[in-house]
Image (cartoon, rainbow, N blue to C red):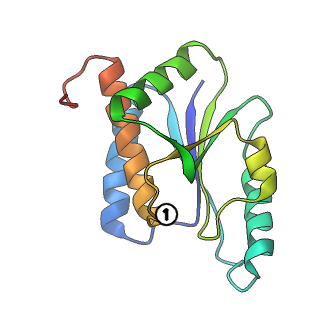
Amino acid sequence: MKIKLLVVGKTSSLNLQTLINDYVKRINHYMKFEIIMINNSKLKKINPLELKKIEGNNILKKINEKDLVFLLDEKGESYTSLEFSNFIKKNIITRSKDIVFVIGGAQGFSKDLYNRCNSKISFSKMTTSHQLIRLFMTEQLYRAFTIINNNPYHNE
């Protein structure tokens, strides 16, 4: 079992990528974790609906039939860090499936992807850069594992 983070496009900021890489290493101390980038560089001149469909199909190709899929979406459920750690723990303990979190492109998710997902998670009702959400997600996953394992990091 592992956790995957599917992201559309690359992180252009070297500083952000360095921070993300640090959290990826930290998460891998607790569980196998990887970030999978879905390339979007050739798709920039397409209308938004078509772009969502193409990106959605490219994302769906990376998802297995048995995976638990959670979209990071502003209309999703919000969690505190403790609630999110319980969410992670529940899904790791009670399931033998891989957990896949998806950060979509700037236009959002396709209908097919919404239909495939198990649930949606929101970090905020505000719109946030997809590159920043990658950092937030990796940091919160690391925080969740430290809470689950009673390691010092999170202060309540």
Q: Nearer the viewer, residue 109 or 146?
A: 109
Q: Secondary structure at mark 1?
A: helix
Crowding at mark 1 (Cα within 10 Å: few <14, some 14-19, many 20+): some
Q: Residue at x 38, y 50 (%)?
A: 136
Farthest residue in the bottom direction? 45
> Can I make out residue 73 in this image?
no
Q: Nearer the viewer, residue 81 or 18?
A: 81
> Can I make out residue 136 in this image?
yes
Is 105 drawn above or below residue 150 in the view shown?
below
Q: Residue at x 59, y 70 (%)?
A: 106
Is 78 drawn above or below residue 75 in the view shown?
above
Q: Quadrant of the N terminus?
A: top right
Is 126 drawn above or below residue 98 in the view shown?
below
Q: Residue at x 57, y 40 (%)?
A: 4
Q: Is residue 47 left or right of residue 130?
A: right
Q: Quadrant of residue 118?
A: top right
Q: Which residue type does callout 1 highlight? A: His
Q: Residue at x 18, y 30 (%)?
A: 155
Residue at the disc numbered 1: 130
- State the image coordinates of residue 31 (x, y, percent, origin top left): 46, 26
